[in-house]
Image (cartoon, rainbow, N blue to C red):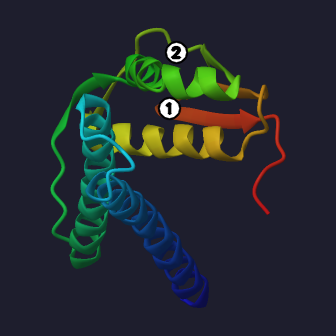
């Protein structure tokens, strides 16, 4: 229980930090537009939209967590291919990956094995792992995702070239 309490406290501190960042960016950009330092054009509008989208996603994550704590989180289970989901999520972060120079390799020995799962929730998990990999792997580093089938279980193993979390 103590480990759960510590993990929750750390997670809340992390979320608080994550929420402050887009709010600070929004405030700064809006002030710059108001002061005439930055023009209000399509580029600034897209930047503001990206930050509000990020903020909305974080707020939804908090909501989902509270539902999970209450045991009220709903799952939409369906037949899905985890390999395809991981490939899609890797493609979705391609621009960020190119900025960091990090290579991401998916090694799958499962073929197109179908599982019963919630595509949205599992996609969130993969997104979080990918974002953490981009954030905490050294530039020009390497991430390897292994997908293996062991009996009736699907195993996902995640490796990076470091330096790792401190």
Give x and y (percent) for residue 34.
26, 58
Residue density around tag 2, few if under 14, some if 14–19, many if 20 or more, within 10 Å: some
Q: Is residue 131 visible?
A: yes
Per the model, the C-alpha gap separating discs 1 and 2 is 8 Å
| Quadrant in which the C terminus is drawn | bottom right
The answer to whether marks 1 and 2 mark residues whose Cβ atoms lie closer than 8 Å is yes
Outermost residue to the top: 111
Considering only vertical position in the picture, is 29 above or below 87? below
Considering only vertical position in the picture, is 137 above or below 103? below
Q: Quadrant of residue 140?
A: top right
Residue density around tag 1, few if under 14, some if 14–19, many if 20 or more, within 10 Å: some
Give x and y (percent) for residue 75.
18, 49
| Quadrant in which the N terminus is drawn | bottom right
Q: Residue 154 — which label?
A: 1
Give x and y (percent) for residue 81.
35, 20
Q: Nearer the viewer, residue 88 or 75?
A: 88
Q: In this rendering, would 69 be left or right of 91? A: left
Considering only vertical position in the picture, is 83 above or below 69? above
Q: Residue 110 — which label?
A: 2
């Amino acid at each position: 229980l103590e480990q759960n309490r510590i993990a929750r406290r750390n997670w809340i501190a992390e979320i608080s930090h994550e929420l402050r960042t887009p709010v600070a960016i929004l405030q700064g950009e809006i002030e710059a537009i108001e002061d005439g330092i930055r023009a209000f054009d399509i580029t600034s509008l897209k930047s503001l939209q990206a930050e509000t989208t990020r903020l909305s996603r974080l707020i939804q994550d908090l909501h989902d967590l509270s539902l999970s704590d209450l045991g009220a989180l709903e799952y939409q289970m369906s037949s899905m291919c985890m390999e395809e989901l991981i490939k899609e999520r890797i493609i979705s972060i391609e621009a960020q990956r190119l900025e960091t120079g990090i290579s991401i390799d998916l090694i799958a020995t499962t073929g197109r094995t179908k599982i019963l799962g919630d595509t949205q929730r599992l996609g969130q998990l993969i997104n979080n792992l990918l974002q953490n990999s981009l954030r905490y792997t050294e530039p020009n580093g390497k991430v390897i995702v292994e997908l293996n089938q062991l009996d009736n279980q699907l195993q996902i193993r995640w490796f990076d070239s470091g330096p790792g979390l401190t």
